[in-house]
Amino acid sequence: MTLRTIEALGQALRLPASTIERYVDHARREPEDIAPRNASVLTGDTLAAIPDWYHFAILELTHLAEFQPDSRWIARVLDISVDEVNVALQRLIRLDLLDMAARDRWVDSAGDARVSLQSLPPETIDQRQAGSARLSASAARFVPVTYREQTSITIAVNSSSLPRAFEIVSRFRQQLTDLLMEGEPDDVYQIEIALFPVTTLKRERTDRTWDAQ
């Protein structure tokens, strides 16, 4: 769609101006060449095509010694449908993220690529967040505490400490990843670390600059 069409549809749907601008900004971006095999960052264009969490879970399953290259086995261990697995496999192959080197050997071609959410369209971000929330809630209900660690803290903060806090989170995430990848993998986990405001104070202070960040 053209930028003018996006703006017209946004106004017709009575979307907030900031939301319309996010769609327009996404449409202005030049399509990026998708080459995750040699890339260190997965682009928003790639992620927009694979919004569901189980795409990456399938890639990680290929690293397990007990992995079975069978749609029914994957569907069972991820608790999703066989149809969802088959559609996901087609997408991963098309995007060159999965290589079926042989009938009994599948290779994760994404390697250690990082995920960049900077250029994701709003609806994809919503879908990914909703999927993560469902996974977290399901784990809290059905997974024994000996196999999970889930905490949430709401605290008053000094905003001047945020840059240092973000550095600590980034360093911790890398250290935790390195630790968990030691030895032979035998399961697939999801790591979620979040630090974000729950008030509108920053939005009120920064006014229009909030939506640009």
Image: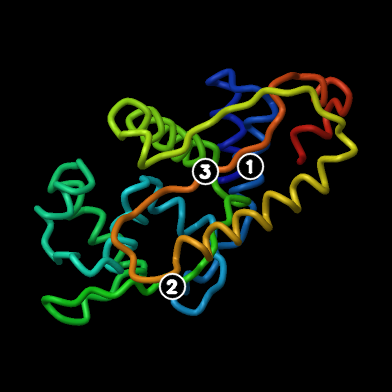
Residue 87 x %, y %: 21, 53
Q: Nearer the viewer, residue 166 or 100?
A: 166
| 172 over 15 or under it: above or below | below
**Residue type at numbered disc 2:** Gly
Residue 110 lies in what quarter of the image? bottom left
Label 2 Cα neighbours within 10 Å, binned few <14 / some 14-19 / many ≥20: some
Residue 98 lies in what quarter of the image? bottom left
Residue 152 x %, y %: 57, 28
Q: Which residue lies under the disc numbered 1?
A: 24
| 37 over 90 or under it: above or below | below
The CA distance from mark 3 to mark 2 is: 20 Å
Question: Who comes first in sequence, dot 3 or dot 2?
Answer: 2
Instruction: Give the residue displayed 39% in from the left and 71% down from the top.
Output: 183
Q: Which residue lies under the disc numbered 2?
A: 111
Furthest residue in direction front, as rendered = 146
Q: Which residue lies under the disc numbered 3?
A: 192
Mark 3 against mark 2, which lies toward the viewer?
A: 3
**Residue type at numbered disc 1:** Val
In what element is the residue under mark 1? helix
User: In the rendered view of the protein, which quadrant contains the C terminus?
Assistant: top right
In what element is the residue under mark 3? loop
Determine whether, in the image, residue 146 is placed left or right of residue 197: left
| 157 over 74 or under it: above or below | above
Question: Who comes first in sequence, dot 3 or dot 1?
Answer: 1
In what element is the residue under mark 2? loop
